[in-house]
Image (cartoon, rainbow, N blue to C red):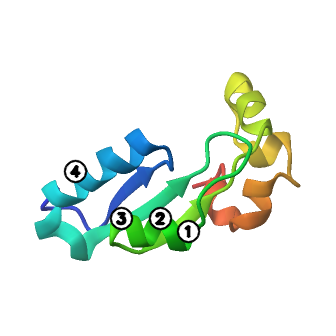
Amino acid sequence: LSEAERILLLTGDTPPAVQSTLVTLQALQDLTSKLLLLHNVSNPGRHPSTEVLQRVLRTPIHASLPYDPAQELALGKGVPLAVVKRDSPFVVAHPPKLYSISD
């Protein structure tokens, strides 16, 4: 990890995910300048706001990946979500560069 340009850390918002992320952040405290924290919303329903999570985790969240029921369909087909459902919340929320097949 010390050789990495950036470290992406994916977290959820369940109590176990938050606790695990806090432990991981503590373990990576010497690498925080490289760390980008991403919030993955993995199920439908109510979730804590990004502001609340940032306060609890004591670090900025660089992106929030919205829940998308079409993701399961895309995974099952082995293709990017943008191919299966271009108007999905994730595809709309994030630039096409993130899931370009040509990259």
Amino acid type of disc 3?
Leu
Amino acid type of disc 1?
Thr
Where disc 2 sits, the SS reads helix
Q: Residue at x 80, y 63 (%)?
A: 92
Image-quadrant location for residue 33: bottom left
Q: Residue at x 86, y 45 (%)?
A: 85
**Residue 98 has which mark?**
none
Amino acid type of disc 4?
Val
Q: Quadrant of the C terminus?
A: bottom right
Mark 3 crowdedness (10 Å alpha carbons): few <14, some 14-19, many ≥20: some
Check contact, mark 1 vs mark 2: CB within 8 A: yes
Instruction: Measuring from the top left, give residue 3's x and y in whole percent.
Output: 15, 62
Q: CA distance from mark 1 to mark 3?
A: 10 Å
Image-quadrant location for residue 49: bottom right
**Residue 57 has which mark?**
3
Q: CA distance from mark 4 to mark 2?
A: 15 Å
Check contact, mark 2 vs mark 3: CB within 8 A: yes
The residue indicated by pointer 1 is 50
Instruction: Measuring from the top left, give residue 60's x and y in whole percent.
Output: 41, 75
| Relative to 45, residue 65 above or below | below
The residue indicated by pointer 2 is 53
Q: Residue at x 73, y 55 (%)?
A: 90
Relative to 103, 67 lies left or right: right
Q: CA distance from mark 4 to mark 1?
A: 19 Å
Q: Quadrant of the N terminus?
A: bottom left
Where disc 4 sits, the SS reads helix
The residue indicated by pointer 4 is 23
Q: Nearer the viewer, residue 87 or 51?
A: 51
Q: Earlier in the sequence, mark 1 or mark 3?
A: 1
Q: Earlier in the sequence, mark 4 or mark 1?
A: 4
Relative to 73, 98 lies left or right: left
